Every structure is written in C-alpha cells, then in structure tokens.
Image: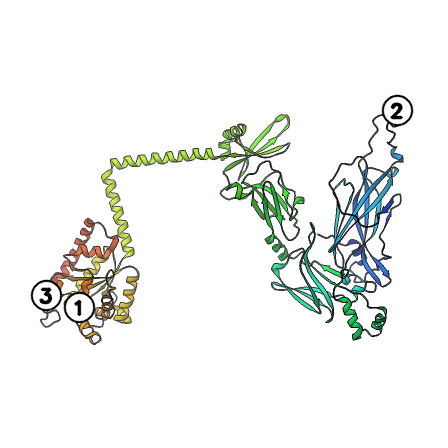
Amino acid sequence: MPVPWFLLSLALGRSPMVLSLEKLMGPQDTARCSPGLSCHLWDGDVLCLPGSIVSAPGPVLVPTRLQTELVLRCHQETDCDLCVRVAIHLAVHGHWKEPKDEDEFGRAADPELEEPANAFLQAQVVLSFQAYPTARCVLLEVQVPAALVQPGQSVGSVVFDCFEAALGAEVRLWSYTQPRYQKELNLTQQLPDCKGLEVRDSIQSCWALPWLGVSADGDDVHLVLDVSEEQHFGLSLYWNQIQGPTKPWWHKNLTGPQNITLNHTDLFPCLCIQDSYSFFMAPFKCHLLLEALPYSSNCLFILLWKVWPLEPDSVRTSICPFREDPRAHRNLWRAARLRLLPPQGWQLNAPCSLLAEATLCWQAPGGGPCQSLVPPLSWANVTVNKTLELPLLNAHPNLCVQVSSWEKLQLQQCLWADSLGALKDDMLLVETRGPQDNRSLCALEPSGCTPLFSRASTRAARLGEGLLQDLQSGQCLQLWEDDLRALWACPMDKYVHQRWALVWLACLLLASVLFLLFLFKKDHVKGWLRLLKEDLRAGAAARARAALLLYSAEDSGFERLVGALASALCQLPLRVAVDLWSRRELSAQGPLAWFHAQRRQTLQEGGVVVLLFSPGAVALCHEWLQDGASASAPHGPHDAFAASLSCVLPDFLQGRAPGRYVGAYFDGLLHSEAVPTLFRSVPVFSLPSQLPDFLGTLQGPAAPRPGRLGERAKQVSRALQPALDQVLKAPRDPGGPGDGTRDGT
C-alpha cells in the first residue's frame, strides 16, 4: 500500500493553501552528498539487475532508508514538470578483517592491505524508479573515509535530483548496491494531481486539466470526465501491480465530457485510471494570438491539432480509487486461483498483488478442517503469478496449501489430486528432535497432536506401538524435515482391514445364532414370517387399491344388501366409495358430477369400478343401448347408476373397460345370461358363490395367498347372506322391471 506523501502533507497541513515547490532549472540530473562523503552520478541510465545476495567481505556501505521530496523541474519559469527528489541514507555493514600475520616491525605481512585509517569504503548504489509507463535506473558511486566508519552507524546520505513523473501517478522506488549485500529497499507513493497542488502557474498541463470524478450508483460505477467540448484526451484503465509490470486493460481516445459506466464486478483494488493528453503550444505567433483572442477559431484549430493525436510525452494523470473498496477486494479473491504444479511447485494467480499468508495443512478424509503444519509458508513469499517451491521431500495427496487474508481462509488446494489420487487414511506423525539424539513422536488428530504412548482414548493412542514399529521398519513416508522436526505419513490400511475383519466375524457369529434359532423354532418362525408377509401385503393393498360401487337403487332392501357388501369389503381392507355414504355430496353436486369426481379419483389411484347388476340395472342398460339420449329418467334423485351410464358405456364401446371395471350380481336375483353382452368384456362374478375370485380381482397383485383369500371370502359371505336372504324373501311387483329375471327366468 502506498505510504502517505509525508513531506508534502507537512507543507499542506489541512489548509487548501500549498507552499510553493522548489524549482530546478535545466534538464540535467544531479547528485550531491552530505559532508564527509564524495559521490558521482554515472551518465545515462543503467540496467536494473539486482542479482543475488552475497556475503560482505568486510565493512560495506548499504542503503538503510529512502526519503522523497517533490520539486519542479523547469525549462522556463512557466514551463515546469513535477519531479521526485530522492535521498538515500547510508550506513556501514560488517567489520574490518584483522591481519593474520605481522612482521617483527609490526607492519602487515600483506603489503596490499592498508591500515583502516587510510582506507576508503566505496559503494555503487543503484536507484530504480517506476511510474507507469516509465521505468529508470541510475547508478551513484559513493565513497566514505575509513575514519568515519563505525559499523552499524549512519555515515550520511546522497541526494538525487530528480525523476520526472506525471501528476497523480503512483511511483515505486528501489535501492540496492552492486553487488547486493542485503534485501533491496523499496518505497511506494502516490503523487498528488493538479487538484492537490498550487502549481497551475508553473505546470502548463494543469491549465486545461480534464477533471476526473468517480461516483457510485447501485451496482454501477460512473467515471465522470469534466472537460471542454473540444478537448481531446486518452483514457486508460490498467491493473497496477506491485510485483511485475502494469497490465493495460482498456484504452480509448475520447473527445469532450464523458460519463463511462463500469460494472461492480470489474472493480479491483489495483484498477487505476489514467487520462493523458498533449499540451504543446502552437508557434509563437499563434501563442500571442491566443493571449489576445483566447477563443479564436483559427488558433483553436492549431491548438487542437497539437492535442490530437496524443504524443508519446503527453501529460498523464493517474488515480487508483478502488484501493479500499470492499467490493473490489471481494472481486479480487473471487478472481484469485491457487494452482499446484508438479512436482512441488505452487502459484497464486490474481489480477492484483495480495497481502496474504500461505500455509501447509493436512486434510484428513471424511471432511473436517485442514490442520496447519510446519513448515509455514511465509506471507512474504506469496507473490502472485509467480511459481514458488514447496519445502517438501515427498508429495502426498493429503497435503494442501491454504491462502488466508486477515485470518480468514480464502483459498485451499490439495496437492495434485489428479496425479496422486484421492485422500488417504494415513496417520501423520510429527517428530520433534532434542539434544543427545532424543526424539518424541505425536500423531496429528482432529483433537490435536496425541503422543503415541498415552492413555488417551484415540485411535493414535491405541495403535501407538504399531505406528512406532511401522516408522522404524521404513513403512512410513517422510514428507519434510529440518534440524529440529520431521513429518511422516504412515499408512493405516492394515489396521482398517483388521477392524473390518472383526466386524465380519461378529456378523458371521450373529448369522449362525439366527440360523440355529430358526432350526429349533422353525414352525414358530415360519408362522411369524407368514403373518408378517400377509400383513405387509394387506397394508400395501389398502394403500394401493380403491373400489367404487355403482348400483341401481331399486328398493330399500337392495340398498341394505349393497351397504352390507360395502361394509364387508372395507374390512379386507379396501377403500370403498358408494353413494349410500355420500348422500349430502350427491345432493349438492348432482349424481352425474359426483360420479365423475369419484370415477376420476378411483382410476387415477389404480382402483376399480364395480358394476352391481340387478334387474333394474339391466333394464336401464337396455334402455340406454336402444334409445341412447332418450332413455328414461333416473328412478330417484340419488340414483348414480342411471347418471353414470353416459360415461360408463363409452368406455365399454371403445374398449377401455378391461382392467378398470368389474361386474357382479347376486345369486338368486339375476342369471349370468341376463347381463348385457357389452359388459361381459370384463370379469363378471356371482356373489357370494364366486367371492374368492371377486376379492382377488378387487385387490389385484397385492391379493393374499388362496387360503387367506378363502378365509376373507367366508367373512364377507357371512356378512352378506342375511341381507341377501331378506331381499329374496321379500315380495316383488310382477310388473316391475325385474319381472321374469329372478332365478334366471
């Protein structure tokens, strides 16, 4: 994160008034030193090649701190550019080497070694500067007399003038020596723009600055550029990364005021906005005319021609407004990807740099949190888009890498799952080495690291002796080690097999006991199983089968007979629907509507419609078959049979009746030949003589075995016979509809 521009803020305070910046005349870079030092600036820029860190051969000068200040570099009094002055503070690192041999006069045996008092320390200090899209490196040679050298103390500073930078740009500075004796210093700062400086009289680019504002509207972000209608400028959006070069994302050359909309999913902390435009004066003649006639169309044309197209050295103003935006940080983690690269590399890919901590962890199968391990991966090594090495001796599928930010887990990836396979049920042993070759072992479990020889009721404690033998016999895989610790992965397959062997043995023993019990109590067991099976089938039939009874209401005795049949069928059990039990609904809906609703529900549930034929029902069927719609009216307001014929007959005529309808008639009331031929396409049963077959058809596939079915038929027959006897004994009207049908005549 950029640090505050402290020198400027000291000058600004909280007041909008700003002190004037120091002006440097001329384009040349210069360097100067504090008293006691001598320095020299090399001509031209050099290549930025830090190299590896090497050991210091003795006392050396190293940079210890970077300090910056804003100045103006001016070509003329009113033609200046913003410039960054850098002060590098130096100190001595290391000590003089004592001479090993001296001659008899006390002089150094090696004539090339000089006394420290007469020596000089010399250092080549590299100062690197980067501000999109510019990068520079300069080389400073610094010398300090040995008399001023005190190891670990500052010897002074060298000041470089200066690096030109665009208003509002973010600059990065690095400093190190060649060769490099320590990690390079770095500093990142955000430069102010024209809005934060009173430099409009000195910096011409601020005279016609395109003002850039950022506003939010729900999920959208608006970039508002307030410039004149004729102003030409370029607008760039880029990802400004600390590690690595900047990545351009979007660029357009625009004219006049603009309002550009960004979706909130496009926001990232390192997304920066830069507007650039050329501001060169036209020839002197036109410059005078501009002063006299600032709105002259001719000179305005020349001025615009200078502004467009954009020149390479155009003025650039940059801002990075989303650094602290929570949405931008959420988008960054959503876009981040953790990749593990064989054999032992890993990489964190993200559009921006991340301040994160990476750790190794052990993921046990079956879920649960991933347990952190040593060695930790320092957060300083989490460099995005760069392949890093894992400090492992061997790979294991249970080893994972976690990336966290502010103690919150963001990403986790286990090692090369494609090549190493699924997680293994291995036990991780942590070895701690002490003095005199002493060592202790503990097993990593969800509750913590359990010592192998402990009285804890955990798997590791129970198997401690076996795990130790596995480790000593070389059956465990070493994952990592240093001087004090080591990690081992021990397979648990054989212990799991032993446990399952005991389980199978117990199951076989139980099966043997049950078999012996079955032999001794065979009859009782068979009876119990038979009853259980029949109860289950009866329950399934009750849930799966419904029956709708349709009959012609001839007299009260016949209705009692139908009611007795319906009640007996309910004891099987079956779900029976009959109009005798639904008089109120029948009166409210009407016979035809009631029948339609009951028929649809019964057939949808896989049930069956039972047609109970009587002399009156046969007569009604003949009337419908002969006269159709002109058939006589129903016998009563509740006669559902007469109303149902309009739906029943089409099913029989079109062949849809089999499997959905069943016919029945009562012994002594009707002969089988009296049933109309059309209805014989479905089974027609005589009751109660054919009750077993009738009940088996009603219950369908879930019907009980024949013996059980016969017992239920006897129960239904006993309930049905008294009502049937009363109907047979009752006198009948010779002119009624049933004349000539009783006893089959």
Quick one: label 3 or label 1, which is nearer the N terminus?
1
Identify the mark nearer the N-term, 3 or 2. Answer: 2
Residue identifier under label 3 = 742
User: Looking at numbered disc 3 in the image, what kind of residue is underneath it?
Assistant: Arg
Front residue of this view, candidates 468 and 261: 261
Image check: 432 left or right of 194?
Answer: left
Q: Which residue is mark 2?
A: 103
Q: Residue 125 at what x, y percent from top left?
A: 80, 44
Q: Position of residue 270 (x, y in %)?
A: 67, 55
Query: Which residue is denoted by mark 1 in the rendering?
Result: 617
| Viewer-nearest residue: 118 or 691 | 118
| Residue extending furthest toward the bottom | 630
In this rendering, would 693 be left or right of 98? left
Neighbor class of circle 3 (other Cα within 10 Å; few <14, some 14-19, many 20+) is some
SS class of the residue under badge 2?
Answer: loop
Using the numbered discs, state the Cα–Cα distance from disc 2 to disc 1 in whole angstroms. Answer: 145 Å
Tag in front: 2 or 1: 2
Which quadrant of the figure has residue 377? top right
Which of the image's four quarters has the C terminus? bottom left
Residue at x 75%, y 48% (from the top left corner) = 186
Is residue 190 visible from the viewing direction of this image? yes
